[in-house]
Image (tube, grey):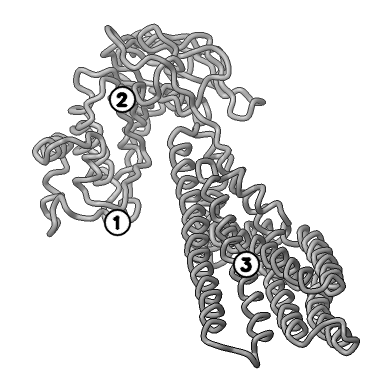
């Protein structure tokens, strides 16, 4: 159960001292309980002999107790609640920074629902539970210490009896903690499974609707996964209740018997003449204060079992691999790119790229072609350092990419891919993110060069138009041109291009091609090519097959060779010349 305290300190960092101060304030607050105990005894003792001086003494004790209680309460909430808010604010910030520098492989191996759950639901729950549990535990300890001291001060036999009940109650708490720990861990895992099933089910609704004749058993299986995981959560909670209910009742009974026992034992000692009436009344009241104060500790058992597991989960999510910075912060001279004996594997097993060797001189246009799965997109991702090579190296200006500071390296690239992501923000802000200090005039000029100024001006709010979630208010071609405007504003020397027209309608294709011409002028261009014109105009063509470089050269050279390139050109020419006769 004290795992909460240990793990709180592990996560606290610079907030450790504030947590310690908070615990100290809890003890200060509960000194007031001991003072109430003293005031109660004196009040009973002087009950028939009260005078002005004694009333003043009682008033001062009660006032001091009240001030200590208020000061301690304020101090503990400020220190503890403020600390946990700060701890988890820093956690969110740290995870956010780590996500920025995570290799792309992390996002393919880690479910998005896990990251979202950690940064929203789990972190908020832990933030609240830790503060409550931390205060409950120290409050319970403080109540036990100060009231037991008071009881022992009044009568050793009563003190020993209360101490025995307190010890049994704590043993019962630990039994509840150990019994609930396994079920609570399972509850967390099943909650994650339910979240995954729910997200999958919601996202799959359009697919299910588009296939009305789909096998009903398949549909039922998809829905059943949500129902099953939901039922597993219910079953787990019921099982948890049945497991701990006996000890919950036993704990409550012990506290009740403790209060009753102190009262009966005090009554017996009073009848035997061993305790005078003022002490007897005070001891009875103190017994109820002690065991009533311990009642809230039963809530800590579930929190104590659940919270450490949730914290371990947060630590797992925060353990994000990082692309390490190198020392180079600037590159002078030409920025040629060179692949040297490069091999790459996503999983450490199957190689996607095998022994690539080629050079891309500055300001040359290079087209990469090959069948699906040949490794074309992987080449682009490695250049952008979304991943690091398994073997060999990529050199920029003679230096391994890993020797560059990541921020410096990415400043040399503008990336335009088929799948365009726009943020839920205005058009002008989506373009300006490429150059945050750009003026409105610079943004508008980039938009004009990208052939998107005209359609932007047709919106009522023009450049202040919000594009919607993921750019949903724009067509695919419009989103693509916005992304090109963004790349134009960045004005990087190297353009990484996944043929942007392959998934847009012919109406937009012409405008996008003009925008790409603007973007690639006097730049190094590395393009995954699908269009004949792009391939033919390239200074160098890289032909990949099964991760190997099987051909290299310009169009005139490669078209004379038997092989994959010639077959590619033939297939494209046949596709362009087909017609439909009715």
Outermost residue on the bottom side: it is 48
From the image, tell me which residue sits under label 1.
Answer: 468
Q: Which secondary structure lies at badge 3? A: helix
Q: Is residue 546 visible?
A: no
Q: Report the quarter where the N terminus lies.
A: bottom right
From the image, tell me which residue sits under label 2.
Answer: 411
Q: Which secondary structure lies at badge 1? A: loop
- Residue 428 location (% of width, % of height): 19, 46
In the image, 53 versus 78, the foreground residue is 53
Earlier sequence position, callout 1 versus callout 2? 2
The residue shown at (60%, 62%) is: 135
Mark 2: give few (<14), some (14-19) or many (20+) Cα within 10 Å.
Answer: some
Depicted 101 relative to depicted 95: above or below:
above
Depicted 382 relative to depicted 340: above or below:
below
Question: Which of the 4 image quarters holds residue 177?
Answer: bottom right
Depicted 210 relative to depicted 517: above or below:
below
Q: Which secondary structure lies at badge 2? A: loop
Earlier sequence position, callout 1 versus callout 3? 3
The residue shown at (48%, 15%) is: 563
- Viewer-side label of 1, 2: 2
Q: Is residue 186 visible?
A: yes
What's the mark number on residue 223?
3
């Amino acid at each position: 159960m004290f795992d909460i305290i240990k793990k709180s300190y592990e996560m606290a960092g610079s907030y450790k001292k504030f947590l310690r101060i908070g615990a100290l304030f809890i003890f200060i607050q509960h000194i007031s309980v001991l003072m109430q105990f003293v005031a109660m005894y004196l009040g009973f003792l002087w009950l028939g002999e009260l005078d002005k001086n004694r009333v003043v003494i009682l008033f001062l004790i009660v006032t001091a107790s009240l001030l200590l209680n208020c000061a301690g309460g304020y101090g503990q909430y400020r220190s503890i609640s403020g600390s946990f808010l700060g701890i988890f604010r820093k956690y969110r910030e740290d995870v956010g920074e780590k996500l920025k520098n995570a290799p792309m492989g992390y996002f393919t191996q880690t479910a998005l629902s896990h990251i979202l759950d950690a940064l929203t639901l789990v972190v908020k729950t832990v933030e609240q539970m830790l503060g409550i549990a931390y205060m409950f535990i120290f409050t319970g300890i403080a109540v036990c210490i100060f009231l037991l001291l008071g009881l022992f001060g009044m009568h050793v036999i009563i003190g020993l009896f209360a101490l025995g009940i307190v010890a049994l109650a704590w043993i019962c708490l630990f039994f509840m903690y150990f019994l609930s720990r396994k079920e609570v861990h399972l509850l967390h895992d099943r909650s994650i499974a339910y979240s995954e099933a729910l997200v999958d089910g919601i996202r799959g609704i359009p697919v299910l609707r588009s296939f009305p004749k789909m096998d009903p058993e398949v549909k039922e299986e998809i829905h059943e996964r949500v129902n099953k995981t939901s039922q597993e959560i219910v079953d787990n909670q019921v099982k948890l209740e049945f497991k701990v209910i006996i000890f919950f009742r036993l704990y409550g009974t012990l506290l009740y018997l403790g209060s009753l026992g102190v009262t009966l034992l005090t009554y017996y000692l009073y009848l035997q003449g061993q305790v005078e009436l003022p002490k007897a009344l005070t001891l009875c009241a103190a017994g109820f204060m002690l065991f009533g104060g311990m009642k809230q500790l039963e809530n800590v058992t579930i929190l104590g079992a659940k919270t450490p597991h949730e914290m371990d989960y947060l630590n797992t999510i925060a353990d994000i691999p990082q692309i390490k910075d190198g020392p180079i912060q600037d590159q002078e001279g030409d920025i040629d790119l060179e692949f040297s004996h490069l091999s790459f594997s996503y999983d450490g097993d199957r190689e996607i790229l095998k022994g690539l060797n080629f050079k891309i001189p500055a300001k040359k246009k290079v087209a990469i072609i090959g069948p699906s799965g040949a490794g074309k997109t992987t080449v682009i991702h490695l250049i952008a350092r979304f991943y690091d090579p398994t073997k060999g190296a990529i050199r920029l200006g003679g230096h391994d990419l890993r020797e560059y500071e990541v921020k410096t390296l990415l400043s040399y690239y503008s990336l335009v891919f088929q799948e365009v992501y726009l943020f839920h923000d205005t058009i002008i802000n989506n373009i300006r993110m490429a150059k945050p200090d750009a003026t409105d005039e610079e943004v508008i000029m980039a938009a004009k060069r990208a052939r998107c100024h005209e359609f932007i001006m047709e919106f009522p709010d023009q450049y202040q138009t919000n594009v919607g979630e993921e750019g949903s208010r724009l067509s695919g071609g419009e989103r693509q041109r916005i992304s090109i405007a963004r790349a134009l504003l960045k004005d990087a020397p190297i353009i990484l291009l996944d043929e942007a027209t392959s998934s847009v309608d012919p109406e937009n294709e012409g405008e996008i091609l003009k925008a790409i011409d603007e973007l690639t002028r006097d730049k190094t261009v590395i393009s995954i090519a699908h269009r004949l014109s792009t391939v033919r105009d390239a200074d160098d063509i890289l032909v990949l097959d099964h991760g190997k470089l099987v051909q290299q050269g310009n169009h005139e050279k490669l078209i004379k060779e038997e092989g994959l390139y010639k077959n590619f050109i033939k297939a494209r020419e046949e596709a362009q010349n087909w017609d439909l006769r009715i």
